[in-house]
């Protein structure tokens, strides 16, 4: 989703990275964020027992 869509939100802060295990190795951000791997996302949003 393009960040430019949210240009009018003054306090917007990126604090989570989804599918962090699928990103390219050269891709990094200057701020520390929580990260969720594909398996963590599937477990969180998948069917609950």
Image: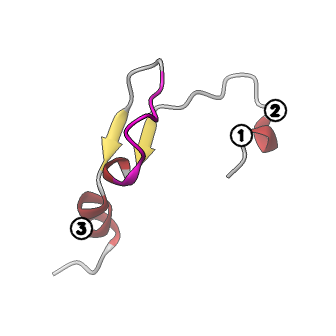
Residue at the (24%, 63%) spot, across then down: 39
Name the side, left or right, on which 30 lies relative to 2: left
Q: What colouring does the structure picture have?
A: secondary structure
- x then y, percent, for residue 44: 28, 63
Is residue 29 shown above or below 36? Answer: above
Residue at the (67%, 23%) spot, across then down: 11
- x then y, percent, for residue 7: 81, 32
Tell me the SS state at disc 3: helix
According to the picture, the residue beneath numbered tag 2 turns out to be 7
Residue most toward the top?
30
Q: Which residues are magenta?
A: 22-29
- x then y, percent, for residue 17: 43, 42
The answer to which quarter of the image holds residue 14 is top right
Residue at the (84%, 31%) spot, across then down: 8
Would you say the residues marked 2 and 1 are in contact, meaning their CB atoms lie under 8 Å apart? yes
- What's the magenta bit mostly, secondary-structure-wise? loop
Tell me the distance, in whole angstroms, between the alpha carbons under discs 1 and 3: 27 Å
Tell me the distance, in whole angstroms, between the alpha carbons under discs 2 and 1: 7 Å
According to the picture, the residue beneath numbered tag 3 turns out to be 43
- x then y, percent, for residue 46: 30, 75
Name the side, left or right, on which 6 lies relative to 14: right
- Residue 3 numbered tag: 1
Between marks 1 and 3 in the image, the one whose residue lies nearer the viewer: 1
Most foreground residue, 8 or 23: 23
- Can residue 40 be found in the magenta stretch? no
In terms of sequence position, does the residue under pointer 1 or pointer 3 come before the other?
1
Residue at the (44%, 29%) spot, across then down: 28
């Amino acid at each position: 989703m393009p960040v430019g869509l949210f240009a009018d939100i003054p306090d917007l802060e990126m604090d989570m990275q989804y599918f962090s295990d699928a990103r390219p190795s050269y891709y990094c951000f200057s701020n520390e964020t929580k990260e969720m791997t594909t398996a963590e996302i599937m477990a969180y949003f998948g069917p609950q027992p």
